[in-house]
Amino acid sequence: MTVDVYNEGLKFNALQEDWRRLQRHPNTDLDHFALYLSHQGSSARPWVMAVKNAEAVECIVVGRMDAGRATVDLGYWTIGLGRMTSLRILTEGVLGTMSAEAAGLVIQKLCESLVAGAADRVVLCNMRTDHVLVQAARNVSARFLPTMLSEPQPHRRMQLPDDAAAFWSGLSRKHRYWLKQLAKQVESDFPKSLEYESIKSPAQVDSLCDVVEQVARKTYQRGLRVGFKNDGFHRDRCRLFAEKGFFRGWVLRLGGVPRAFWLGCVYGDTFHSEFTGYDSDFRKYELGSLMFAHMVEELILEKIRFVDFGLGDALYKQRFGSESWEECDLALCAPTARNRIMTLLAQAVKGCRMVAMKLPFVGRLKRAWRDRVAREARGRQDNDAEA
């Protein structure tokens, strides 16, 4: 068994046939990977490994080399630790079935790249805590300081029933009543003005992105500089998956004005949720919940089996999710004094965050922070409109 590294565009093209055979997630779709690199220019380059057994590709590990600032999250605050070159093994970056032997060889190859100075650190991104690659990484020499960058987080998904009636009957009586009351409240306050629009066609992508931006710029996610942004990469990404027949988008309107959206991709038998948001002025109507119920009904008609809620946790994911597993970001650092100091600093910040998250007022503080950044995002929008 051998591990070959492909770190130039022309070289990793030799893996196309096996890559397309093994890919199973939009994040590591070959065309999406190439699109991302084309938009990043010189700031990112491929670092792809193929595990071969008698010249046959057994599995592929998809990574990229990023030059930038290392950060650590402390709730909604992000602390910069200085410039680092990171070799990131991407979310869902292991294509195919990886054996324990293959995982050991891959980690050995990654450690060799750290010793050679190719990167300051290796980061296994959002990988299941029970994955063989994580286990192999945690067992390497202490000189590489194997470190979880944050506490493991649940990743949730929902198994869809065969029909919409089964979806509704599967909810608790309290949950069904709550959703129906939301719909009644919207109908009472905005008579006959609730509309849903479903978008799949490549020809609709540009206009959809313009509409979604009207809502996204009012959300707290925009204030935190995350979530959907109507830029060249996101438009091209939506168009790419629409051309493949994978893209799904929904917009909720009240009186013809967009107030909420949900975007994602159908890949195989799973809908992967990617971006969602709502106009914060309409929070009391919980438009996201209404949109989710409508979206699920349409996905059931398509015979989709699962909704994957993607990264991070939220109350709606806990409410609707039927299964979950834990994921983590695990880092190995190059054995230099500077990298060890930065890694130990990140561990100290992580420890502070763990203590802070146990305080009783953290939930209220997070809600107040989201409200503030949403108001700031709206204020910037109003200022731009006046200008």
Image: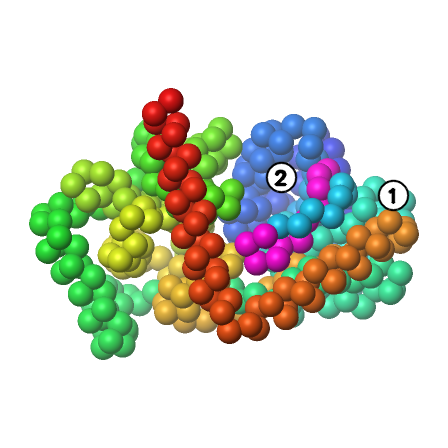
Pointer 2 residue: 16
Question: Would you identify the image quadrant in which residue 296 lies?
Answer: bottom left
Q: For numbered disc 1, what is the local secondary structure? A: loop
Q: Position of residue 211 (x, y in %)?
A: 32, 35
188 vs 216, left or right, is left
228 vs 14, left or right, is left
- The magenta span reads 67-77
Work out whether 146 lies above or below 322.
above
How many numbered marks appear? Answer: 2
Q: Position of residue 276 (x, y in %)?
A: 39, 49
Depth order, front residue of 119/79: 79
Q: Position of residue 300 (x, y in %)?
A: 29, 59
Q: Position of residue 160 (x, y in %)?
A: 34, 65
Magenta-span inclusion, residue 261: no
Classify mark 1: residues with Cα within 10 Å, few (<14), some (14-19) or many (20+).
some
The residue that appears at 37% across and 39% down in the rendered structure is 378
193 vs 298, left or right, is left
Q: Amino acid at mark 1?
A: Gly
Work out whether 217 lies above or below 301.
above
Q: Amino acid at mark 2?
A: Gln
For the question of whether residue 60 can be seen, the reply is no
Pointer 1 residue: 117
121 vs 166, left or right, is right
Q: Name the chief secondary structure element in magenta.
A: strand
Work out whether 199 lies above or below 156.
above
The residue that appears at 30% across and 40% down in the rendered structure is 199
